[in-house]
Amino acid sequence: MSATTETGGGLAVEQNGINVIQESERKGRPSNLFWPWFGANVSVLAISYGSFIVGFGVSFWQATIAALVGIVLSFALCGVVALAGKRGSAPTMVLSRAAFGVTGNALPTFLSWVLLVGWETVLVSLSSLATATVFSELGWGSGGDATKVLGFVITAVLVVAAGVLGFDVIMRLQAWITIATIVLTIGFIALTLDEVHWSKVSGASGGSAQAFIGALALVATGFGVGWVNTAADYSRYLPRGSSGRGVFGWTTFGGAAAPIVLTVFGIMLALSSGKLSTAIAGDPIGALTTLLPTWYLVPFIVVAVLGLVGGAVLDIYSSGLALLTLGVKVRRPVAAGIDGVIMCIGAIYAVFIADNFIYPFEGFLITVGVPIAAWAGVFVADLLHRHEPYADAELYDARGRYGAVHLPGVLLVVVGTVLGWGLVTNTFAGWLDWQGYLLGPFGLGGKGGSWAYANLGVFVAFVVGFVGWLLLGRSTVRRQEAATSAAPT
């Protein structure tokens, strides 16, 4: 595919799809990665995660350590995957073909696509509901369908437009979102700081080791692990000579900086008020409006919507690339548009039709996240094995050195998934209560035991993929790197 652009209204439409970015088009510095990652993760939803962590029954210091470690380590995984984008100048799920084979890679790519489109739908739905809640507080409506429609339209238009226009527009949009949300979020913290009561915060009793591990897993899966299958998509335009430390550092810092501050503040708020913590469980964003003076509700909805848009924009761009990687024969802007239509249909159903859709659907997405954790383990281990550049053309030809199917990589994802699902429980939807089937046989107390909500399965799935490919993948990678071009020209 040629690297051309189409312009309209002064905006360039990116035409690069899943092709390797040509040397002449590679641009920017590693520090540019700060903007998309910060903009996608500076969401007030991170404040609500503080309440979710406290729900495990941990103390302030346990919760804070879990937040710091979980956020930093999970975004460090994104930093490692971003290195692959710099090395290969191709999207994440294309580079994944080196470990799974050009055809075998379809399994993790499909799961990645489902996960990304699903989270787009959730973020747009939450934005619509948050807008309705705030407008109701302002007396501008009853929080009914009219205000939900407004929130939906604003969010959907921004997300789909950015996804269709592509990389350059997304980078600029995320920079503006970052600046605006930093200012408005500081305002939120300043106005709600008096809601923090240190005596209650410091007096919270500590929890068990299981509770701490559960909180840690929740944080890791809620933040960086959810982005690991997209990280190379935003570093692929960088020159291949860019600093690897810079790529890793700016990706990790950009993703982790805002969630650390917001989540720790959310922990303090939740420990200060049990009533607030309970309200957040029912309405993660709307509940925060009860802490604000009326005059700041409009700035609050701006920061809430922008934070959700920032995340959804990265999702729709990467989901379009995943759709192309699956073999759909359309141009990248069309692929993003297709995903945008699916997103809108899902959000309309979630907001206007279903009585209780978002939380069960989130449960489904968490379920899909277990095999993605196993995939991430394989991908990171594969990257650690590699010392030579990818063979660009052969990433697209099953007859080349990367082959059609690497059975060990695929089997590691399957095994990691089976073990992972057996070691997690999911209360978001009744039809997911089959999970946790290994908690009893492994002597962990069953589904009613103290380990039931520790989310061990996410860690296990990642470890199976990572350790398995460290042991099994070395010879495969060495053989690939020693091969001369075997793909027909």
Image: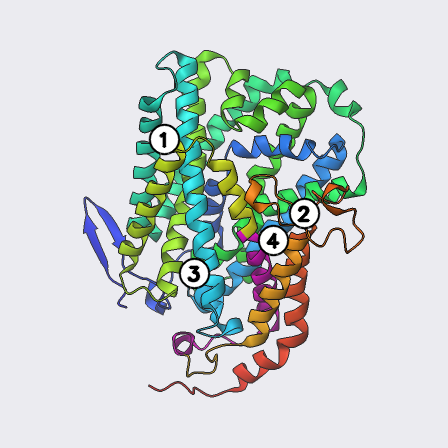
Where does residue 109 sit, x and y in percent of width and height? 45, 62
To which residue does mark 1 refer?
A: 352
- Residue span colored magenta: 368-397
Where does residue 235 sit, x and y in percent of width and height? 45, 58
Nearer to me, 227 or 341: 341
Please tell me whether residue 335 is drawn above or below residue 220 in the rendered image: below
Q: Label 3 amino acid?
A: Leu
Where does residue 150 sit, x and y in percent of width and height? 31, 27
Please tell me whether residue 428 is drawn above or below residue 164 in the rendered image: above
At a point 41% along the width and 49% down the height, the residue shown is 117
What distance separates the C-alpha of mark 3 from that of mark 1? 42 Å
Q: Are marks 1 and 4 in contact (CB under 8 Å)?
A: no
Tag shown at residue 455? 2
Nearer to me, 421 or 337: 421
User: Can residue 241 be seen at all in this image of the molecule?
Assistant: no
Q: Secondary structure at mark 4?
A: helix
Between tags 3 and 4, which lies in front?
Answer: 4
Q: Label 2 amino acid?
A: Asn
